[in-house]
Image (spheres, rainbow, N blue to C red):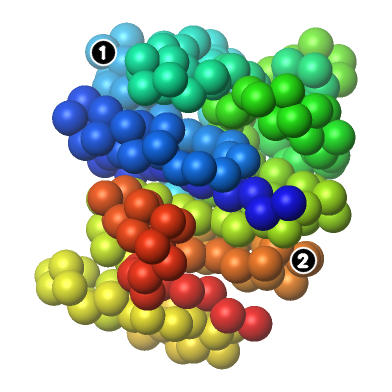
Amino acid sequence: MRLYIIKIGGNVIDNEQALQKFLSEYASLNAPKILIHGGGKVATDISAGLGIEAKMVEGRRITDAETLKIVTMVYGGLINKRVVASLQKHTCNAIGLTGADANIVKASKRPVKNGIDYGFVGDVESVQAPVLMNLLQAGLSPVIAPLSHDGQGNMLNINADTMASVTAVALSKLAEVHLVYCFELKGVLENFEDKNSVIADITPDKYQELKEKGIISKGMIPKLDNSFDAIASGVASVRICHADDLIALVNKEEKVGTTLRK
């Protein structure tokens, strides 16, 4: 079974027109698929409106108790259900989930490390791949919000790139899994000012070099960290591309975006 796990994030989530175009194309993919979404800037904007400052460290959100309430409402409610409703419009029988639903993803609260307390941020402990496979075999397309639980009744915020990666790794034991990260850029860029300067292939050594030069930084770091973890753990392929290139990549198998290699 060839399975696609697709993560959508970045400014695409915030742009209604771009999001609807992506969801229309996602729905048309003639293959088993799981969609994992980020939160865009919605949670940040709502936090600001309530006087709660969003704090980020290397692309990862610090989640205090008040922020946890906001991301649970926004990620698990507003964004997740909006995406599900849109996919239903495009005749893709989607089902919206968080990691707490059916115990799909269980996590533990991240410990304080190097003086950084991430708050209610979770590190994934397990993914119930058979449950997701059962949903796929029932003709459903899971849409997963980047939230989990600790088994003690507490919700935890999960980096969406991490959620995509660990889900892909878990399912790679049951299927041929291809992980695709879609956002508003054409791939990983050599020069951020030149939107066409896509780096076609990145190996672990090349990745280290790009980080040292400052070409890759901030939110791209967890994305690539997770990508290389996935490749090393059995995922068949990992690609990073523009949301508009999804059909070209999957259906037409064109060489677009950035490919991560061992």
Q: How far apart are marks 2 and 1 (CA)?
A: 43 Å
Label 2 sits on residue: 234
**Left or right of residue 197: residue 254:** right
Q: Is mark 2 on a helix, strand or loop?
A: loop
Q: Where is residue 121 in the image (x, y as percent from the top left)?
A: 64, 34
Residue 114 quadrant: bottom right
Q: Residues within 10 Å of mark 2 (few under 14, many from 20)?
A: some
Give the residue at x 49% y 88%.
206
Count of marks placed on residues: 2
Label 1 sits on residue: 49
Q: Residue furthest left?
A: 193
Give the residue at x 38% y 62%.
252
Q: What amino acid type is highlighted by mark number 1?
A: Gly
**Left or right of residue 119: residue 232:** right
Residue 107 visible in the current orientation:
no
Q: How crowded is mark 1: few (under 14 residues within 10 Å), some or many (20 or more)?
A: few
**Left or right of residue 258: residue 244:** left
- 208 or 50, nearer to the observer: 208
Q: What amino acid type is highlighted by mark number 2?
A: Gly
Q: Do the residues labelled 2 and 1 touch (CB within 8 Å)?
A: no
Residue 152 visible in the current orientation:
yes
On the rendered image, what quadrant is the C terminus found in?
Answer: bottom right
On screen, residue 172 above or below 205: above
Give the residue at x 73% y 23%.
138
Q: Where is residue 199 in the image (x, y as percent from the top left)?
A: 34, 80
**Left or right of residue 111: residue 185:** left
Q: Position of residue 28 (x, y in %)?
A: 40, 37
Q: What element carries label 1?
A: helix
